[in-house]
Amino acid sequence: MDGLPKLDRIDINILAQLQQNARLANVDLAQAVGLSPSPCLSRLRRLEKAGYIASYNASFHLSKLVEHITVFTEVTLNGHRREDFIKFEADIRRYEALQECHLVSGGL
């Protein structure tokens, strides 16, 4: 976080508004955060340049596109060495449908 511009309440409000609707026109965004359009656009560009805004995305209702299910499963590895985890990760990447993989550990 070193070297990044400090965020004030207006910057955070800009980010919050965009998170709700990334397609907001600058005029509407400016009005929502209490700025005129020019300073709002300047702040937006500064946030983009600093990397606070990673991308602008569309969110889909997947159920309208295709039937889908979510499956959680458990995988237990025989070994727990670094090489075992590296091999597992390389092998699991072959499955395009896989969205997430989490390592959970701890005692019983």
Image (cartoon, helix red, strand yellow):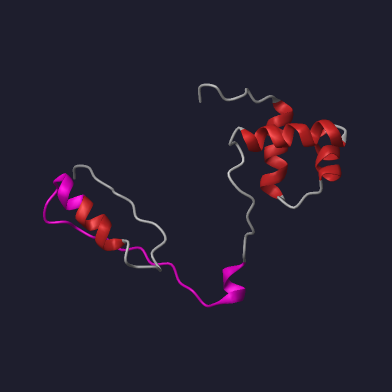
Looking at the image, which residue is at 45% across and 71% down? 69
In which quadrant of the rendered image does the C terminus lie? top left
Looking at the image, which residue is at 32% across and 61% down? 93
Query: In this image, 67 relative to 81: left or right?
Result: right
Which of these two is toward me, 37 or 98?
A: 37
Query: In this image, 99 relative to 26: left or right?
Result: left
Looking at the image, which residue is at 39% across and 57% down? 100
* Range of magenta residues: 61-85
Question: Can residue 73 be found in the magenta stretch?
Answer: yes
Q: Furthest-left residue in view? A: 79
Query: In this image, 47 relative to 106: left or right?
Result: right
Which of these two is toward me, 68 or 10?
A: 10
Looking at the image, which residue is at 42% across and 61% down? 99
Question: Can residue 83 be found in the magenta stretch?
Answer: yes
**Quarter of the figure with residue 26:** top right
Query: In this image, 106 relative to 16: left or right?
Result: left
**Quarter of the figure with residue 74:** bottom left
**Quarter of the figure with residue 33:** top right
Which of these two is toward me, 72 or 51?
A: 51
In the rendered image, residue 103, in percent from the top left (x then y), is placed at 29, 49
In the rendered image, residue 59, in percent from the top left (x then y), is placed at 62, 60
Query: Magenta-highlighted stretch: main secondary structure?
Result: loop
